[in-house]
Image (spheres, coloured by chain):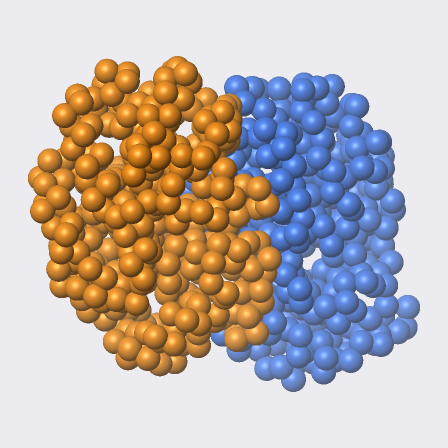
Chain colours: A orange, B blue
Amino acid sequence: MRRLRVTSQSGNYDVLVGCGAWRGLRQFRGYSSRFILTERGLWNRWGKRFVREAGLRDAPPIFVPPGETSKSLKMVETVASQLLEHGADRRSLLVAFGGGVIGDLGGFVASTYMRGIDYVQVPTTVVAQVDSAIGGKTAVNVRAMKNLVGTFYPPRQVLADPTVLASLDERAFHSGLHEVVKHAILAGPAFFRQLEAKIPSLHPNQGRALEPILARAAQVKVEVVSRDERESGLRRVLNLGHTFGHAFEEATAYRRFLHGEAVGWGLLAVTSLAQLLGLLKPAEGEQIARLVRRVGPLPPIGDLSPERILELLPRDKKAVAGQIHWVLPERIGKVRIVKDAPLGLAANALREVQRGSRHE
Amino acid sequence: MRRLRVTSQSGNYDVLVGCGAWRGLRQFRGYSSRFILTERGLWNRWGKRFVREAGLRDAPPIFVPPGETSKSLKMVETVASQLLEHGADRRSLLVAFGGGVIGDLGGFVASTYMRGIDYVQVPTTVVAQVDSAIGGKTAVNVRAMKNLVGTFYPPRQVLADPTVLASLDERAFHSGLHEVVKHAILAGPAFFRQLEAKIPSLHPNQGRALEPILARAAQVKVEVVSRDERESGLRRVLNLGHTFGHAFEEATAYRRFLHGEAVGWGLLAVTSLAQLLGLLKPAEGEQIARLVRRVGPLPPIGDLSPERILELLPRDKKAVAGQIHWVLPERIGKVRIVKDAPLGLAANALREVQRGSRHE
C-alpha cells in the first residue's frame, strides 16, 4: 500500500494506492448520511466486497447509466434529486465508486449539492486510478464541448485498489496504460525503464504486480497538482498527448477510441513533432514510440483528415484565445510548453504518425 | 457613493453602492472577452445607459427569460453553450446584470464555466442590491428544491446603482424593503430608527434618497459574510425571517408572495415566536412589527394551514438532519440561534400572525 499526500488550497488529502485501499473509508464516520454513486454493472461485480471492506453497509447506492452520456447537467439534476429524496444534507458524504465518468460527475455533484459536500474518490479504472480521480477537477459535458462545465473541488481521499481492475476488459485496461506511459515520460528514466521492463507482465487481474506501477504513476499526478492546483502553469504538462488526443476523439465523435487510446496516438504525434522541431533526440523519440506501441494495438487513424484534426486542435479549452499550448517531450523526464509551433510542422508530424498507422 | 469591502477566502472584493456605481466596471479590462447576462425587459430599459457608463460596448448581452424558472441546470447549459459559441474562454468576464435570478444563475455559470471565470454582480432590485448579490452564494433550483445546487464563488465586484430601481413596480420595490428591515433588525437601533424615519419617503425613482439606506443595509450583509463566508455559524443570522418565509413560499408554490413579502411575514412570525419564548420584550416586538407593516401591504396568509407550514419548515436546507435553526430577535440589534424551540409554540406564533392577517 502506498500513501501519497496531495496539498491543496482547500485542504490536503491522501491518495491510497494498493490492495485493501478501500478500508480507508472506515475512518469516514461522523457524517449525517453516506451515499455511493456508481453504475450497476460494476456494482453487481464488486458492490458486496466494497461495502464490506469500506464499512459502508448503511450507504445506499445511487446508479447512473454507464458511459460518457451520464456526464451531463441533466444527470446532475437526477442525482441531486435522488440525494435529496434520500435525505442527504450538507453534512452527508458522497462516495464516487467508478471510472472517470462516475468520478467527474460525482465530484461535480458533491461540489454543488447544497453548495458543496464532502466526497471520496474510489476509482475503478486505470486512468481514474493514476490520473482523473486525483487533483479535484470535476466536470460534465455540455453539448459539443467535453468538460465545459465543472469545478475545482478536492476529494477528502482517493482510494485506488488495483484488485478491482480484474473486471476490466483487455482493451480498456491497455487503453489506461497509455496514461501510465504519459506519466512515465513526465517522471523520468527510472520509472520509464521500470515500465518498459514490466509492461509484458501487466495484467488486469494481477493486482499485486500492478500496485507499484500504479502508485508510481499516481505519484506523478499527485506531485503536479500539489504544486499547481488550478492549472495556471505546471499542471499543463499533464496534457502531454492530449492536444492531439482530444482532436482524434472529436474527429471520430468519441466513438472510435477509448480515451487512453487517443492519448496513445497523441503521444506518438507530439513525439514526432518534438523531433521535427529539433527538441527531442531521435533515439529518445524512438524509445517513447516503442513503449507506446508495446502497450497494445491502437484503432487506426490513417483515414483521418489532417486538415480536420488541425482545425479541431484550437478548440481544446486549455487554449486561451485560440492559442495552442503544445506539451512536447524534450527528453524522458522533461517536457516543454511551446506556444508557437508552426501548424505545418504539426501537420507533418501527424502525417508521419498516420503513415505508421497504415503500415501496421 | 459608498465603497464597502468584503473579505473572502478566495479574494477580497468591493461593493459599490450609489448613483454612478456602474462606472466601476471600467476598470475591468484585460479580459479576453466580456459578456453580459441579463433579461430582455430590463435591457430594453437600461441597456444603452449601462453599456455607456460601464464602458461595455464590446460586450454582447446574453438573454435569459425573466422569472425563477430560469434558475435551472437547463439554463446553465444554454448559457454555457452561448458563451462557448461566442468564444468565451477561461479569461473571459461575465457581468450579471439583473435581479436575484440573474445574479444566482450568472454566478453559478461563472463558477463552473471552464471551471470558473471572473464575474461582476450588477444587481438591479432592492433585494439583490442589499443582499443576494453580496457574499458569493450562487445557486440554481432542482425540481422541488430551491437553491439545491450551487457554489460559493465570490464576484470580483458588486456594483449597485439605485437609479435602476426606478423601473421596479411598487410591489417589487416594497417587497425588497422587507429585506432592508431584516438588515435593520440585525444592525441595531441607529439604522432601525433611520429606516423608521425614512420609510414614508422611500420611492423607487428617488435614487439619491435611497443611496444611504441601501448602502447601510448592504453593509450588514458585507460584515456578516466577511466574517463567515461559508455559513458555518454567523451567516445563519441572515436567515432571520427566512425559515417561516420559505415555508410560506413553498406552501403557495412560489406563486402568491414575492420573496421579500414572504420574508416580511416571516419577520412577523419569528418576532411573535421570540416573544412567546420570553426572549424579546413586547415593546420591541411591537416596534419591529410596526415597521414591517409600514413597509407596505402583504398578500394574505390567513388561509394557510399551520400544520402544513410546520411540515415545510424542516425542509429548509439550512437545517442539518432535520433540525430547525431558528433565528430569533432578542432585541433590535441582536438575534439568537435557537435549535430547540417547541413546535407548538411556533404554531402559536404563526396563528397569532395569521389572526392579524385576517383582521386587516
Residue at 79% x, 56% y is B258
Residue at 62% x, 81% y is B343
Camera-side residue of A285 and A108: A285
Q: Position of residue A340 (x, y in %)?
A: 38, 16
Camera-side residue of A106 and A286: A286
Q: Is residue A210 above or below residue A34?
A: above
In the figure, is residue A355 to the left or right of B162?
A: left
**Which residue in the rendered view is the most extreme toward the right?**
B360
Residue at 38% x, 76% y is A44
Displayed quadrant of residue A239: top left
Q: Position of residue B219 (x, y in %)?
A: 59, 41
Residue B9 in sight here:
yes
Residue B131 in sight here:
no
Camera-side residue of B47 and A122: A122
In the figure, is residue A87 to the left or right of A126?
A: right
In the figure, is residue B8 to the left or right of A120?
A: right
**Which residue in the rendered view is the most extreme toward the front?**
A359
Q: Is residue A73 above or below residue A162?
A: above
Quarter of the picture containing the C terminus of chain A is: top left
Q: Is residue B166 above or below residue A116?
A: above
Q: Position of residue B60 (x, y in %)?
A: 70, 27
Camera-side residue of B213 and B155: B155
Quarter of the picture containing the N terminus of chain A is: bottom left
Displayed quadrant of residue A84: bottom right
Displayed quadrant of residue A145: top right
Looking at the image, how many numbered discs can be counted on the residues?
0
Q: Position of residue B231 (x, y in %)?
A: 49, 56
Residue at 28% x, 16% y is A277
